[in-house]
């Protein structure tokens, strides 16, 4: 494969991708033109500031990225299935594990998480939108553009190949003279600005826009988990921004932060990147914990056990996650005292997580359990994450880590907590809230096939990898010999990967099938839920709530239903008033496009293009600053008509 | 529904409580400043670690110009003070006072940037550029990032002066002035630490 | 003022113009400070700047104590700016901005001190 040209040449997989990209793009343009949908696309999606639509866009993007990351995984497992395979060259293998990791964490898990934030939080707290709807749109388009830039490297210029964290000196100009690394840096930088903005947005939304009467200690646990995650996002992402910027300054201006010569210190990069990297994994797992709390409570028909300790444990995790980062480089040589401190802090952070697991189990105990799809994924999470967490504690023992570090033991551990904890949780959340956003449930039968394939596939794939780690198989090797004795474990692991892939395919089929044949949600409350999002129609009207609810307790919707059943008189509803809404805007999209131009220019060292892009960015900011007419009102009769269409009297 | 009518109901409607976007935007900006603080913290951490990595190149103690950085410090500090005077003028509903003091602030800020550019050019002439060694990479990035923040603030300030000139002192422009004031004070706070950790330590 | 929009609904213009003026009466969210506060803050800051400069240029202390002292002065001046210029004590409760700031300072310290501690083994390697 030749990456020295603008377009990557020499690899059939890449030519295939080129063709697929061209065909898909042409098909999309043709369809939009033929069905005259350009206007619709612009008005309804590209310029939207509605959190529900932004959530859906994040979801679609994350699922597409899950596909690409998954294909990367299957390619790797194919190459490793047997010794001395010639399926992938070493260079290509390096690119694939790099893109696999980067995509799965930054372009799959993060957007899937933001999808859930957007789809759920305002509805759960009784708000009409987030604190900064315009900024919310900016966040999405920045992510989109960052992901585009990163994905483009596959066919233009060449993918990065220095691992998902791009350690120097390998990622420096001296060892990676091509443009792949630049795509990596700019894809993540641009997307990272969006992530930081989302953190601020949802933090303020949760603190300031809850329905009247909803005290923080009455707020649903998913929203609490989002709060905890956002605090971590806000403090962690600036570190990533700087670290990648310094790497770029090295590459672009010839600086010496992390070079081998002239005073540079590559180990400082490792230190800085993990200062972000460790909080990052807690950023993605905390919302999953929140989802589990919602699902367990709803499908056991019980108030969550230990609400206060759930809140405290999430807040402790969110802060403590900033004090454990050096466990990612125990072997770098910082010394026994440093290692001892971080070993202890790492073990300590397992405690609040343990509290949560017990609380979930206590909630299930004596509950009336429904084995819905969200509940299945939640139950599967418990043993999976428990094992993954236990292996984490093993890794936390610094001297022992000298044996496990960067072996397949590590790979098995982090996949177990990320898949068993994060992915299972997000899938549970998607199944749970899908009817609210789309108005129909996802098919049960196909879902169960997907569930079992994923679960069995997971253990088949990753359990052998713990053994491989003990046997000395190092991470990121592209092949191995027959004499290592690793072959049986690898072939089993690869079979597991195929099973997981099949599970994903069933989910794709499930989504496609359910659009036409899925059980419609006509009540807005398909699960007999406990929280406010189930009190409005599915899908919700653009303004969410015709009247902002007044809240008097936790599980506010459950309380209202119980009160109704008990025949308690409901308070006289306040008269309807015109609803204040933000206007759509094309600026977020255009702003992001200018960032794309700037990023592309920086990637290829085309300074004129980079400058043009940045000027465009500045102009967008100025134009927005001068815009004062940014809102409108929905009149009362339109509210009445919209509610009537969903069969609701007002 | 007329505007006046809508606001007559403001006191009685929970709906309207959410209309008061301005405090929400100020809180959001405070949080943004905390993230910017962490950005600088990371740059400071990098500078502190690489401080001794001069690899045989020119030393800061040889090249730093004391009158230069002292002048920059007092200019920026004064501009922080004048931005406060601008806020006071705004409180007194004086559009001319507000724009006037913002203009003084911007002028001082421009003088700061001018001095800094001059300093960078001088350093480059003496063989200290961003590519010389790890120390100078850290210096130029840390100090330069602060300078870029100031420059960005200048453009923003001018845009704001134009908006105030056109619309006067309203809830929205009031919030915008508060926000840029916070930004400007924040930049002076960062400079205090820059001045201490980079320049004073550098000449010791 | 209300304006009909193209679709026949009513659109109310917010922010500027007549509507904004209706809010001219003192905004409880606004923090103004007083001239006195700004002048005191300014003078304190000048003093807190001059002293460290004098100490350094005159080599008044040994290196380590000198560093501690000038950093101390920087912290105090930071607090002066925070209280006298940025009005951290005003604004509506609960004061989330102050909470964010405190946590931010803790993390700032962790980033700087933590990095220096972890990377300090370098003095052996150098």
Image (cartoon, coloured by chain):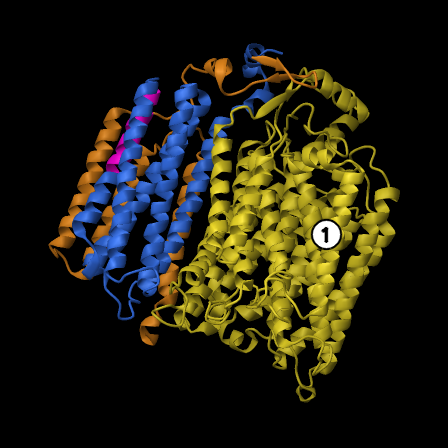
Q: Nearer the viewer, residue B133 or C91?
A: B133
Q: Which contiguous range is marked in magenta?
A: B77-91
* Magenta residue check for B47: no
Q: Residue furthest bottom?
A: A483
Q: Colour of chain C?
A: orange
- Position of residue A167 measured from the top left corner of the image (x, y, whole percent): 49, 67
Please tell me which residue is depicted at 63% across the width and 57% down the height of the picture. Answer: A151
Image quarter where the N terminus of chain C lies is top right
Visible residue check, residue A487: yes
Q: Colour of chain B?
A: blue
Q: Which residue is mark 1?
A: A427
- Position of residue B6 measured from the top left corner of the image (x, y, whole percent): 58, 13
Task: Name the dominant secondary structure of the magenta segment.
Answer: helix
Q: Where B62 sits versus A48, above or below?
A: below
* Protein chain holding label 1: A
Visible residue check, residue B178: no
- Position of residue B156 measured from the top left corner of the image (x, y, whole percent): 40, 34
Please tell me which residue is depicted at 37% across the width and 38% down the height of the picture. Answer: B153
Q: Secondary structure at mark 1?
A: helix
- Position of residue A278 measured from the top left corner of the image (x, y, whole percent): 52, 59
Q: Nearer the viewer, residue A414 or A501?
A: A501
Residue A381: quarter of image: bottom right
Residue C46: quarter of image: top left
Q: Where A527 sits versus A395, above or below?
A: above
Counting the numbered discs, the total is 1
Q: Residues within 10 Å of mark 1 (few under 14, many from 20)?
A: some
Q: Where B160 sits versus B70, above or below?
A: above
Chain that is coloured yellow in the picture? A
Position of B167 with respect to A125 (left or right) is left
């Amino acid at each position: 494969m030749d990456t020295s040209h603008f377009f990557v040449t020499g690899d059939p997989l890449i030519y295939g991708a080129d063709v697929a990209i061209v065909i898909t793009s042409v098909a999309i343009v043709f369809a939009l033109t033929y069905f005259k949908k350009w206007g619709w696309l612009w008005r309804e999606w590209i310029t939207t500031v509605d959190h529900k639509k932004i959530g859906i866009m994040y979801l679609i993007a994350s699922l597409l990225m899950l596909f690409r990351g998954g294909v990367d995984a299957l390619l790797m497992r194919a190459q490793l299935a047997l010794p001395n395979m010639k399926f992938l060259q070493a260079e290509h293998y390096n690119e694939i594990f790099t893109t696999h990791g980067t995509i799965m964490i930054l372009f799959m898990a993060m957007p899937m998480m933001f999808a859930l934030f957007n789809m759920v939080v305002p509805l759960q707290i009784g708000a009409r939108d987030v604190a900064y709807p315009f900024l919310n749109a900016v966040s999405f388009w920045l992510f989109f553009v960052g992901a585009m830039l990163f994905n483009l490297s596959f066919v233009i210029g060449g993918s990065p190949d220095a691992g998902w964290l791009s350690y120097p000196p390998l990622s420096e100009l001296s060892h990676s003279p091509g443009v792949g690394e630049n795509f990596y840096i700019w894809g993540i930088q641009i997307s990272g600005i969006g992530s930081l903005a989302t953190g601020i947005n949802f933090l303020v939304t949760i603190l300031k826009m809850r329905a009247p009467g909803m005290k923080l200690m009455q707020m649903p646990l998913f929203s609490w988990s989002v709060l905890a995650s956002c605090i971590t996002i806000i403090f962690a992402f600036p570190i990533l921004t700087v670290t990648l910027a310094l790497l770029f300054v090295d590459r672009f201006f010839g600086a010496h932060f992390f070079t081998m010569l002239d005073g540079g210190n590559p180990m400082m990069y490792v230190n800085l990147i993990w200062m972000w990297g460790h909080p990052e994994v807690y950023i993605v797992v905390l919302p999953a914990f929140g989802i589990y709390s919602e699902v367990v409570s709803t499908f056991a028909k019980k108030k969550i056990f230990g609400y206060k300790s759930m809140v405290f444990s999430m807040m402790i995790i969110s802060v403590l996650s900033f004090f454990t980062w050096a466990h990612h480089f125990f072997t770098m040589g910082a010394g026994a005292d440093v290692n001892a401190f971080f070993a202890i802090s790492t073990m300590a952070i397992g405690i609040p997580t343990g509290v949560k697991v017990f609380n979930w189990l206590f909630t299930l105990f004596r509950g009336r359990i429904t084995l819905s799809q969200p509940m299945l994924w939640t139950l599967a999470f418990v043993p999976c994450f428990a094992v993954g967490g236990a292996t984490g504690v093993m890794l936390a023992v610094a001297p022992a880590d000298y044996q496990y570090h960067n072996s397949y033991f590590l790979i098995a551990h982090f996949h177990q907590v990320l898949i068993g904890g994060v992915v299972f949780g997000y899938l549970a959340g998607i199944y749970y809230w899908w009817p609210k956003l789309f108005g129909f449930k996802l098919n049960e039968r196909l879902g169960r096939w997907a569930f079992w394939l994923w679960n069995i596939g997971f253990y088949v794939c990753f359990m052998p990898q713990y053994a491989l780690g003990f046997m000395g198989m190092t991470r990121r090797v592209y092949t191995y010999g027959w004499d290592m004795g690793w072959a049986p474990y690898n072939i089993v692991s690869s079979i597991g990967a195929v099973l997981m892939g099949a599970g994903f395919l069933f989910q794709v089929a499930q989504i496609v099938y359910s659009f036409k044949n899925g059980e419609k949600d006509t009540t807005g409350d398909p699960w007999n839920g406990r929280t406010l999002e189930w009190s409005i129609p599915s899908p919700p009207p653009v303004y969410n709530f015709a009247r902002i609810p007044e809240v008097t307790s936790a599980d506010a919707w459950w309380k209202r239903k119980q009160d109704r059943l008990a025949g308690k008189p409901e308070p006289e509803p306040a008269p309807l008033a015109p609803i204040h809404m933000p206007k759509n805007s094309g600026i977020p999209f255009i702003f992001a496009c200018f960032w794309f131009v700037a990023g592309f220019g920086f990637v290829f060292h085309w300074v004129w293009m980079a400058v043009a892009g940045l000027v465009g960015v500045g102009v967008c900011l100025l134009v927005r600053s001068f815009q004062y007419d940014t809102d409108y009102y929905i009149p009362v009769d339109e509210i009445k008509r919209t509610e009537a269409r969903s069969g609701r009297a007002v | 529904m007329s505007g006046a009518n809508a606001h007559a109901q403001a006191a009685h409607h929970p709906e309207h409580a959410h209309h008061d976007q301005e405090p929400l935007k100020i809180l959001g900006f405070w949080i943004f400043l905390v993230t910017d603080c962490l950005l600088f913290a990371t740059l400071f951490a990098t500078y502190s670690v690489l401080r001794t990595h001069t690899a045989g190149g020119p030393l800061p103690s040889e090249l730093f110009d004391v009158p230069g950085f002292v002048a920059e410090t007092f200019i920026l500090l004064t501009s922080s003070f004048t931005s406060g005077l601008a806020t006071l003028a705004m409180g007194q509903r004086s559009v001319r006072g507000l724009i006037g003091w913002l203009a003084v602030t911007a002028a001082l800020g421009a003088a700061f940037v001018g001095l800094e550019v001059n300093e960078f050019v001088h350093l480059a002439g003496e063989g200290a550029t961003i590519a010389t060694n790890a120390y100078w990479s850290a210096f130029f990035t840390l100090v330069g990032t602060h300078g870029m923040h100031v420059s960005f603030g200048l453009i923003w300030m001018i845009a704001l002066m134009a908006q105030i000139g056109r619309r006067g002192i309203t809830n929205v422009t009031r919030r915008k002035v508060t926000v840029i004031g916070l930004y400007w004070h924040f930049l002076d706070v960062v400079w205090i630490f820059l001045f201490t950790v980079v320049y004073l330590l550098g000449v010791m | 003022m209300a304006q009909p929009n193209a679709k026949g609904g009513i659109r109310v213009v917010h922010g500027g113009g007549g509507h904004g003026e209706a809010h001219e009466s003192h905004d409880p969210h606004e923090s103004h400070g007083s001239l006195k506060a700004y002048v005191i803050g300014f003078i304190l800051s000048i003093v807190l700047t001059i002293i460290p400069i004098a100490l350094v240029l005159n080599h008044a202390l040994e290196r380590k104590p000198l560093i501690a002292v000038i950093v101390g002065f920087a912290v105090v001046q930071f607090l002066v700016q925070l209280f006298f210029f940025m009005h951290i004590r005003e604004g509506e409760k609960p004061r989330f901005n102050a909470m964010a700031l405190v946590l931010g300072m803790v993390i700032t310290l962790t980033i700087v001190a933590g990095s220096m501690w972890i990377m300090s083994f370098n003095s052996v390697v150098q």
